[in-house]
Image (tube, rainbow, N blue to C red):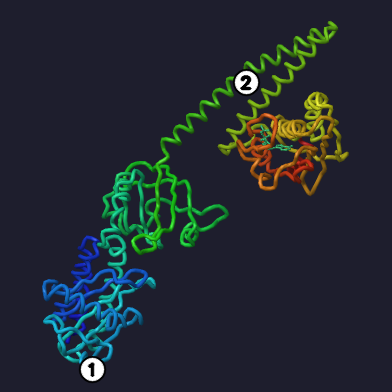
Amino acid sequence: MLSERQRLEALYSIAAALRRQDASAPAVLQTAVSLTASLLGIHHGGVVTFHKDDKTNDIFVLGENAGQPDTRRQVWYRLIAHGLVGYAHHARRTIVVRDISTDPRWPRLPETPFIPTQGSAVGVPLEKNGHMYGVLALIHPEVDFFDAGTVEMLEAIGDILSANIGNAIAFNTTPKDENRYQWLFEDAVVPIIITDLDGYIVDVNRKACEFLRYKRQDLLQLPITAIHRMGTGPVGVNRFESLQMGKEVEFKTAAWPSEGADIPVIVRARRLFFNDHDVIAWVEQDVSAQMELDQLRQDLAAMVYHDLRGPLHTIYGSLSTLSRLLASSGQKTILDLLDVGVRSTRQLSRMVESLLDIQRLEEGKAVLDPKPTSMHSLLANAAQLIQPMALESNQRLLFNLDGELPFVTVDADMILRVITNLLENAVKYTPMGGAIKLGAEAVEGSVRISVEDSGPGIPKHMQRQIFDKFSRVKYRDAPKGVGLGLAFCRLAVEAHGGQIWVESEPGQGSVFHFTLPATRQLETASA
Ligand code: ADP
């Protein structure tokens, strides 16, 4: 029997030998079985591995050359179906057969030179994280050979083996059909990383190595968090937990290659059942080119909007001067035309300003010019701007304003555009002859503005979405638009510390509300 020290040395040498192996299941298993057997002076035994559905996966027998292959297979299938291996597999614990000639757990076997008819045997389950990978079975011609110390050592070897073969079995199983699509993974044009459910890398394809500038073996066993940050999902959901629960996860982050700058990526990950194992597949899409293009597009757009501003101001100024000069000429048609020109130019200017603001606010920049401002004067201004448009549609503009409204500290031009946008939408969506109500009241440290229309209303599922860029409800005969007005309103109101929302029942009109924090008395007084 082995001494304590010999056992420890044996364990160490097996662990070291397995570490040197390339992670292929047959190599790991053959090494482990033959090392264990030679340490104990054993000539008979093997490892049986199982699929998740408990079907036999593979059998690795000691001294592969011994005996007829057919008889050998027959012996081992008996041990699996009616004997030691099957017992250890199903009971998920070590089974020791002290005497194989009398123990009922030892089946009748065909006479072969490679399995003794006398002696003892042991079956050690190979199990990790509740998954049974296989059973290590050893037979010795001596009765009662496997004492408590030897069994303990074999169980420790079993643990090392399970840790090593878990991944190896998953990715190197020999059956041809399971590897049939391996090249698809290996040659995929996108980087793909496979991890176990704890996030440790068990396989990577060629593209992932190129992309991350790592050698394959250096990536194996790293946690995925060494490649990129996981972050938390929307509303703080742990992305790992979502993945483990089978949800697909997609997020934008930066990947850390072994050298060079971070690479912006979109990561799409999903739990998969691959080669009999539960794994997570991570597809890393390099989006640096796309981001550069987006930035370029944004810069270009900002330049265009910025350059439109000047000429628009000039046109507006010229048209206003002309209409003043001709005011007393009595030429009504010309004055009306000029008026339309002035209003359209003003509308265009407002749009350009809002587009520039959207960009600034999306970049997280602060409101440019906040000053204590009278809410009454902003509302009056907005109503005046919208009145001609409402008149054209024969609509009435009604007011429901608190007599006393607190001041607000705002970029007046921006908030004026918010109210005008809401009023313009109300006019656009209210039928001819309808009414639009503009309301304002002081509520708990803030001012609440409401714009109510008698238009088609907004379906519930769109009531949040319409505040996103380019989001529009598909009505029949809907007025033209691009879906930027409400996105600007949301960004502007939120940048001022307020909130914006809509209440609406389809068919019964909509009420848009927004709040702005009221300015404290002191600030108003010093303004
Ligand atoms: P646009 O009017 O240019 O499309 P907005 O951002 O102002 O852009 O509005 C987004 C969408 O919200 C509109 O396309 C429309 O579908 C819906 N919407 C906005 N205001 C109203 C309203 N008062 N009544 C009904 N639908 C509206």
Mark 2 belongs to which amino acid?
Answer: Arg
Residue 235, image quadrant: bottom right
Residue displayed at 48% across by 48% down: 251
| Residue 272 visible in this rendered orientation of the protein | yes
Quadrant location, the N terminus: bottom left
Mark earlier in primary sequence (1, 2): 1
Mark 1 belongs to which amino acid?
Answer: Thr
Question: Which disc number belongs to residue 309?
Answer: 2
| Residue 519 visible in this rendered orientation of the protein | no
Q: Where is residue 298? Give x, y as percent.
A: 52, 30
* Residue 141 relative to residue 480: left or right: left
- Callout 2 crowding tier (Cα within 10 Å): few <14, some 14–19, many ≥20: some
Residue displayed at 65% across by 35% down: 488
Residue at the spot of label 1: 102
**Residue at the top extreme, as displayed:** 329
Q: Where is residue 344? Give x, y as percent.
A: 71, 20
Residue displayed at 49% across by 62% down: 245
Q: Quadrant of ligand 1?
A: top right
Alpha-carbon span between mark 1 and mark 2: 99 Å
* Residue 307 relative to residue 453: left or right: left
Residue displayed at 30% across by 44% down: 210
Look at the numbered disc 2 and say if its residue's Cβ is closer than 8 Å to ligand 1: no
The answer to the question of whether label 1 and label 2 lie on touching residues, with beta carbons closer than 8 A, is no
Q: Where is residue 112? Give x, y as percent.
A: 13, 82
Q: Where is residue 280? Give x, y as percent.
A: 40, 58
Which one is in front in this view, the residue at disc 1 or the one at disc 2? Answer: 1
- In this view, the residue in front, 254 or 473, is 473
Quadrant location, the C terminus: top right
